[in-house]
């Protein structure tokens, strides 16, 4: 899944630098890849942490999205805390949301706590929604 790695543009500066790095050439036409990426991000924005009224993408819980040439998607994500009560359910929610995107093949979700999530990863949109300035 080396063909393209996307990181939520709403996240911190380090993630933004990673997102702008030139991806390896993809067999997927650029226009289709752009549409697919937008649809995947839109799907991720439908998944909410039940304890925080903001979606997981804007919260900065999505660390990495890889789309391979067969349109299989690998997502690396975290939770706001390792003891999150929905830790067992959240990966399934993400898999279902992204799996519903037309053109997406298999979806694999991996949880990581390295680096640990912090409020610094949140987008301005999430900060406004939560009144966390």
Image (cartoon, rainbow, N blue to C red):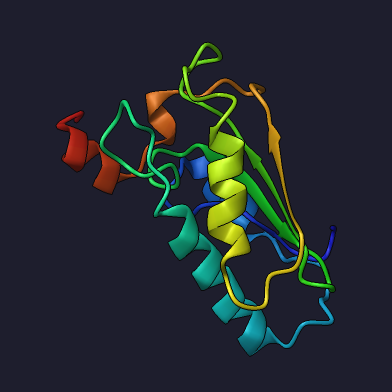
Q: Residue at x 61, y 38 (%)?
A: 91
Position in image of residue 92 (x %, y %): 60, 41
Q: Is residue 35 left or right of residue 47?
A: right
Residue toward you, 96 or 79: 96
Q: Is residue 88 left or right of residue 69?
A: left
Residue toward you, 117 or 74: 74
Asked if residue 47 is positioned above or below residue 4 in the image, the reply reads above
Q: Residue at x 83, y 75 (%)?
A: 25
Asked if residue 59 is positioned above or below residue 70 in the image, the reply reads above
* Quadrant containing the C terminus in the rendered view: top left
* Picture quadrant where residue 55 is located: top left
Position in image of residue 34 (x %, y %): 59, 78
Q: Residue at x 76, y 71 (%)?
A: 71
Q: Residue furthest left?
A: 131
* Picture quadrant where residue 87 is located: top right
Q: Is residue 62 left or right of residue 119?
A: right
Position in image of residue 10 (x %, y %): 42, 50
Residue toward you, 32 or 8: 32
Position in image of residue 54 (x %, y %): 30, 40
Residue toward you, 56 or 16: 56
Q: Residue at x 26, y 48 (%)?
A: 125
Asked if residue 103 is positioned above or below residue 73 in the image, the reply reads below
Asked if residue 9 is positioned above or below residue 85 in the image, the reply reads below
* Quadrant containing the N terminus in the rendered view: bottom right
| Number of numbered markers | 0
């Amino acid at each position: 899944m080396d063909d393209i790695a996307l990181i939520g543009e709403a996240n911190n500066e380090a993630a933004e630098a990673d997102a702008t790095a030139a991806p390896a050439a993809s067999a997927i036409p650029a226009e289709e890849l752009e549409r697919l990426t937008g649809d995947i991000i839109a799907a991720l924005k439908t998944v909410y942490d039940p304890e925080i009224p903001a979606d997981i993408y804007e919260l900065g819980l999505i660390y990495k999205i890889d789309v391979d040439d067969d349109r299989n998607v690998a997502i690396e994500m975290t939770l706001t805390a390792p003891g999150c009560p929905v830790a067992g359910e959240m990966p399934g929610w993400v898999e279902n949301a992204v799996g519903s995107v037309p053109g997406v093949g298999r979806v694999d979700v991996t949880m990581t706590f390295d680096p640990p999530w912090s409020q610094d990863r949140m987008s301005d949109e999430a900060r406004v929604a939560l009144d966390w300035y």
